[in-house]
Amino acid sequence: MSLAEGFVSLEVQGLIAVVRLERAAKLNALTPEMIAQLGQIAQELDKRTDLRAVVLTASGDRAFCVGADIRVWSGLQPLDMWRQWVRDGHRVFDAWANLRLPVIAAINGHAFGGGLELLATTDIRVSEVTATFALPEAGIATCPGWSGTQRLVKLIGPSQVKLMALTGRRIGATEAQRIGLVQDICEPGTALQQALEIAGQIAKQAPISVQLTKQLIDAGNGINVAAVLEGMAGALAATTLDAKEGLASFNERRPADYRGV
């Protein structure tokens, strides 16, 4: 993948993975190649058992991500826009939102459009004081395409999303913290350090408890409810003596003798 197309890097620091958007010269605007890499990295992270937390950040000091690269998607036909941008973007962003591992965003600059929607997939957000946030799509005659009207609404509420999306208004880090978009504000150049400190605190906790608690909180907010309930129910059932008896009776081709324990 060329530098012009951009790429996404993955670095493991002990128990913590650092994922970085690497297209600073273009304000980390997302290309199809970067979306695909984000999806591949999400799949890898979800399979690993040696990690405790993920930090998502970007290169440079001007922008976390200014959204989708307009020069790429503006040339697409409507059906290709649907197939290649909206559907692929949703699939990848959903994968990030549903990661077992907690994800902390280190926001090193502006987050607009798809960049803000990507932030909404993370669990905890740390922002440098100079960052700004916006949903500018209506100003270029389009609409939020990667769950800005859905996931972001659950995060900061419908009226706040309407104010940003319908006016294109930018908000600063202080306002972002007030409405719950950002949890911590830090000085320029320190977001990654602060996010790593939070990730380090998480890494000291019992990892399965952390992952289950994240899923419980999300399910309480209506996110991925079926998978959470069925996953936890299946895991609990598998710890019982009846589960051992069920497997043994199947292998031995005999009726099971269940005891309710």
Image (cartoon, rainbow, N blue to C red):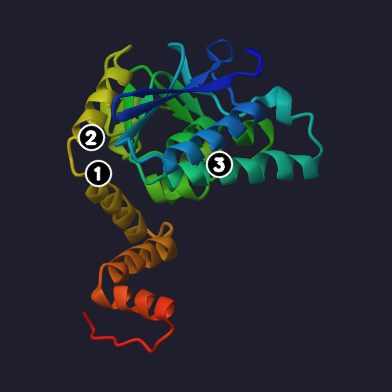
Q: Quadrant of residue 32?
A: top right
Q: Nearer the viewer, mark 3 or mark 2?
A: 2
Mark 1 to mark 2 CA distance (whole Å): 7 Å
Mark 1 to mark 3 CA distance (whole Å): 24 Å
* In this rendering, position of residue 248 left or right of residue 32: left
Residue 215 location, x and y as percent?
33, 54
Q: Which residue is mark 1?
A: 207
Q: Contact (CB < 8 A) between labels 1 and 2? A: yes
Which corner quadrant holds the N terminus?
top right
Identity, as a three-letter code, of the amino acid under mark 2: Ala
* In this rendering, position of residue 170 left or right of residue 27: left
Seen as rendered, the residue at the extreme front is 252
Tell me the element at label 3: helix
Q: Quadrant of residue 203?
A: top left
Residue 190 location, x and y as percent?
29, 15
Q: Contact (CB < 8 A) between labels 1 and 3? A: no
Q: Nearer the viewer, mark 1 or mark 3?
A: 1
Q: Residue at x 22, y 36 (%)?
A: 202
User: Which sits earlier in the primary sequence, circle 3 or circle 2?
Assistant: 3
Viewer-nearest residue: 123 or 16: 16
Q: In the picture shown, does residue 224 fall above or below 82?
A: below
Identity, as a three-letter code, of the amino acid under mark 1: Pro
Q: In the picture shown, does residue 70 fall above or below 124?
A: above
Q: Which residue is mark 2?
A: 203
Q: Residue at x 46, y 48 (%)?
A: 151
Tell me the element at label 1: helix
Tell me the element at label 2: helix
